[in-house]
Amino acid sequence: MSVFSRRQLLSATALVAFSSSALARNFSGRLPWRPNEAYPPSVVRPGGWYFLTADEVATLDAIVSRLIPGDDLSPSGKDAGCTVFIDRQLAGPYGTYEWLYMQGPFSSKPLPTQGIQSPLVPQQQYRQGLAALAAYCRQNFGGKTFEQLAPEEQDKLLQGMEKGEVQLPGLAAPNLTTTMLFNLLLQNTMEGFFADPIYGGNKDMCGWRMIGFPGVRYDFRDVLNNPGKPYTKPPVSIMGRPDWNGAPT
Amino acid sequence: MRGAILATALTVAALAAGPVRAEPDNYTESERGRYLTILGDCMACHIGPDGQSLAGGHLLETPFGKISVPNITPDDETGIGRWTADDFDQAMRHGVRPDGTHLYPAFPYTSFTKMSRADNDAIFAYLRTRPAVEHRVDRDTLPFPFNIRLLMAGWNWLNFTPGEFQPDPQRSAEYNRGAYLVEGPAHCGLCHTPRNLIGGDQTSAHLEGGALQGWFAPNITADKRLGIGDWSEAEIIAYLRTGHTERSAASGPMAEVVAYSTSQMTEADLKAIAVYLRERGGAGSAAPAPVPAEDSRMRAGAAIYDDTCAACHVGDGSGATGMFPRLANNQLILQDDPTGILRVVLQGSQSVATPQAPTAPSMPSFSWRLTDQQVADVATFIRNSWGNAAPAVSAEQVRKMRELTAERPD
């Protein structure tokens, strides 16, 4: 039999042409989008304490203000809101390590690569750690509390805790050592000083102003186009900056 | 032999496509009718629950209540299967159903009256070729007293001028074609002309922009400041074809118009529309004096713009072609009524995806991050920077728009 006739070829082409709409499918990619869609962070409410007791607040205020003393660079850790930040964190998911596997076994002599090995969650570490610090101060400083010590005494005690030269009573591995407590306090104080102000610390973005961090900006094309010129824009928090309300920075 | 098999296969394929009522000899007419349903954007309102047919059921929002859109597939019981071509023409050009009851002017017979009998017959022939879809639509969803259809007789007396389009012999054929499309089947004025208190056209402000469904359809006269007077013919065609130009991206109700209608129009028709809109003259309010940059609202707005908007729309409001609309000399932003800009800032926006511009860039909602006053100030700033000038926006206007967009997101 010969090859297709012209008529047959046209008919076949027509068939394909007419049926192709049923076979071929168009996929046009629209990214998902819904009106009003937003996942706003919850902003810390000022006032009151959600986890810490009054005594713990007084001690922490003193500690964060020795770790970050008020000077011409920045306000103190207390005035920057670090204690508020720590309180709200302890009252939230961080306080109970909500997202961590917290069943045993726990290593009593963990390698650094094994990460957190304490069965205590941050709420317990703060409660037990600050109680141990209060007991240590009572025994060694004639019944005084930490916050009643002179700044030099506070510094010396904190340095001793950091280096492991001071052992607070009742603290031991793997639950909580004195050095672990110091590292925890230092870590959370830094977080409070540099985290977005919506979390309770970094008041008026003082931490960001100190180091020149631009905040939540993410487009620097106009700056990059002017190399060698100083960056002069003020930082921006997730919830804005004072200029947004017509108030000068 | 092989030819016979193919012919049979073609017949079977045609039969399998569903009940087809059109006679083979009026294929040309029904195909013309199909294109006319695109010009008329029938799908935007009559779309059925299946998302493909014209089986109706969609609820149209009007200031008087919700109107359910009827089924216009040829189903005898629930559609227009028993209608004649005369019945259809009577509905299209006079707003009256075969039983003598009045249609509501949400169905734009006020525009369709300008269409020719031949065009209406073609549409009717096309509708008869579509599969009948049984879908009963409740026709009586309006509250009292608007549920009394006889009221429309009085409404028509006040607001309705029946009569077929008459070409202007002084103008080009292209202009007249554009005029026929804009004023007839495409019924642009239904949204772009402001309404009077009873929902009729404010004929004195034809195509000067109107509020509807919580959106604002901007001025499309040839006014340089508020309308399309500053748009080139090519820009108008590109907007209608793709939904996107350097300064604008179709979203909201206009996104549907572009998707179902204008993006599928012929190039000649888009050009005719552009010619008509550009040549028919402009009208719009005069530019106010811009709010001075030292104004505290402008200073706050500048700070918000710099931190929130400039990353995409750029510090000088120039945007990014194809992605982020230009804000300088952007007519949607300059309308006296700030509904458009407030809506986009508060709830975000996704532009239309067309075959020529399939990306459909979107903007996120900023309602969570900005207070009413801050939204007002950034809108005032955008409306009065880079050569823009438009009335300042108040926090109260934002509060109302926030309520509206929260309860009715689309």
Image (cartoon, coloured by chain):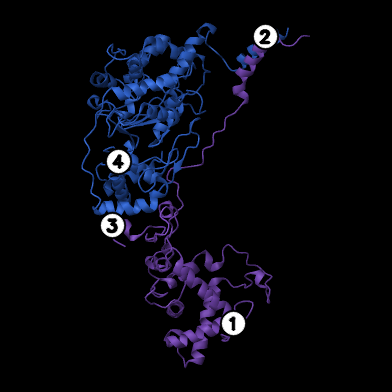
Where disc 2 sits, the SS reads helix
Nearest to the eye among marks 2 and 3: give it. Answer: 2
Disc 4 marks which residue? B338
Q: In this view, does B172 lie to the left or right of B249?
A: left
The answer to whether dots 1 and 4 both sit on one chain is no
- Image quadrant assignment for residue B64: top left
- Considering only vertical position in the picture, is B382 above or below B193? below
Residue at horizontal 40 percent and vertical 30 percent from the top: B239
Disc 3 marks which residue? A246
The chain displayed purple equals A
| Mark closest to the chain's N terminus, 2 or 3 | 2
Disc 1 marks which residue? A171
- Considering only vertical position in the picture, is A202 above or below B407? below
Residue B96 appearing in the image: no
Q: Which amino acid does label 3 sit on?
A: Gly
- Chain bearing tag 3 is A
Nearest to the eye among marks 3 and 4: give it. Answer: 3
| Mark closest to the chain's N terminus, 2 or 1 | 2
User: Could you say where residue B71 lies in the image, as x and y percent from the top left?
Assistant: 45, 22
- 2 and 3 marks in contact (CB < 8 Å): no
Where disc 3 sits, the SS reads loop
Q: How far apart are marks 3 and 1 (CA)?
A: 52 Å
- Chain bearing tag 1 is A
Q: Nearer the viewer, residue A15 or B298?
A: B298
In the rendered image of the structure, the colour used to display chain B is blue
Q: Which of B320 and A82 is in front in this view?
A: B320
